[in-house]
Image: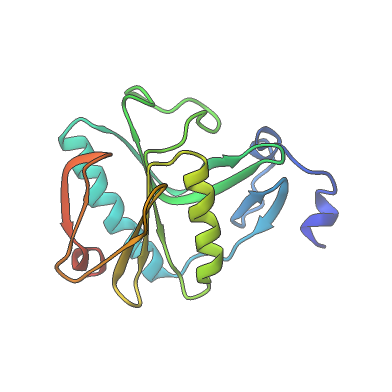
């Protein structure tokens, strides 16, 4: 049975949040539930490295929260889109210290990190990047395990591609953060 049959009407982010867990990952795209494939282990490994580098830095410098495992981020309203960010960072100025409240956060993250999978086609990922930036995410980093690169997107200006010993720095959201790109893929 298709998801269109199961959910004939467009859903809001709040309705999507209340759906029972189907046991399969999904996203809400313009009001429709879209199934996703379970990521492969390499994808999870790179997500884990990003989470540790960014999370340890944010904790050590008392900067904010890091969330991972496809945490829901509302990128559009009417119709609603909820994307599952691989890893994201919320500064304490946006979301106060302590546990997150129930439901989706009413503010966008400061940074989102998406890890490409062999099943993830570049046009689909660029669509997500555009949605995040339109939702006022400051910076979106797309990590490609095959080419071992990080492409950094901001609302203004061209993207920047880093590799090898190039340092990923995000001074506008994580002042002082610096990691050689190769470290994400080791």
The answer to whether residue 1 shows anywhere in this view is yes
Q: Where 33 falls versus 95 (above or below)? A: below
Q: Where 10 falls versus 92 (above or below)? A: below
Looking at the rendered image, the quarter that the N terminus falls into is bottom right
Does 88 sit left or right of 124 as displayed?
A: left
Quarter occupied by residue 137: top left
Looking at the rendered image, the quarter that the C terminus falls into is bottom left
Tell me residue 59's x, y (percent): 21, 36
- Residue drawn at point x = 66 percent, y = 32 percent: 14
Does 76 sit left or right of 87 as displayed?
A: right
* Colour option used: rainbow
Does 55 sit left or right of 28 as displayed?
A: left
- Residue drawn at point x = 17 percent, y = 56 percent: 179
Between residues 114 and 155, which one lies in front from this camera angle? 155
Tally the numbered discs.
Answer: 0
Q: Where 150 falls versus 71 (above or below)? A: below
Between residues 134 and 182, which one lies in front from this camera angle? 134
Quarter occupied by residue 3: bottom right
The answer to whether residue 120 shows anywhere in this view is no
Does 63 sit left or right of 105 as displayed?
A: left
């Amino acid at each position: 049975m298709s998801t269109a049959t199961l959910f004939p009407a467009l859903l809001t982010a709040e309705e999507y949040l209340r759906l029972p867990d189907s046991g399969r990952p999904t996203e809400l795209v313009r009001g429709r539930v879209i199934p996703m494939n379970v990521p492969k282990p390499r994808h999870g490994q790179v997500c884990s490295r990003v989470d540790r580098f960014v999370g340890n830095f944010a904790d050590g410098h008392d900067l904010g929260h890091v969330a991972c495992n496809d945490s829901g981020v509302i990128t559009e309203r009417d119709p609603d889109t909820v994307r599952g960010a691989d890893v994201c960072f919320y500064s304490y100025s946006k979301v106060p210290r302590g546990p997150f409240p129930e439901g989706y956060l009413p503010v966008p993250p400061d940074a989102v990190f998406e890890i490409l999978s062999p099943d993830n086609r570049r046009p689909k990922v660029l669509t997500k990047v555009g949605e995040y930036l339109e939702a006022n995410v400051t910076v979106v980093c797309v990590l490609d395990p095959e080419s071992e690169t990080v492409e950094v997107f901001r609302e203004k200006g061209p993207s920047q591609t880093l590799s090898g010993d190039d340092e990923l720095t995000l001074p506008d959201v994580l002042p002082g953060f610096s990691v050689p790109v190769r470290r994400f893929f080791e």
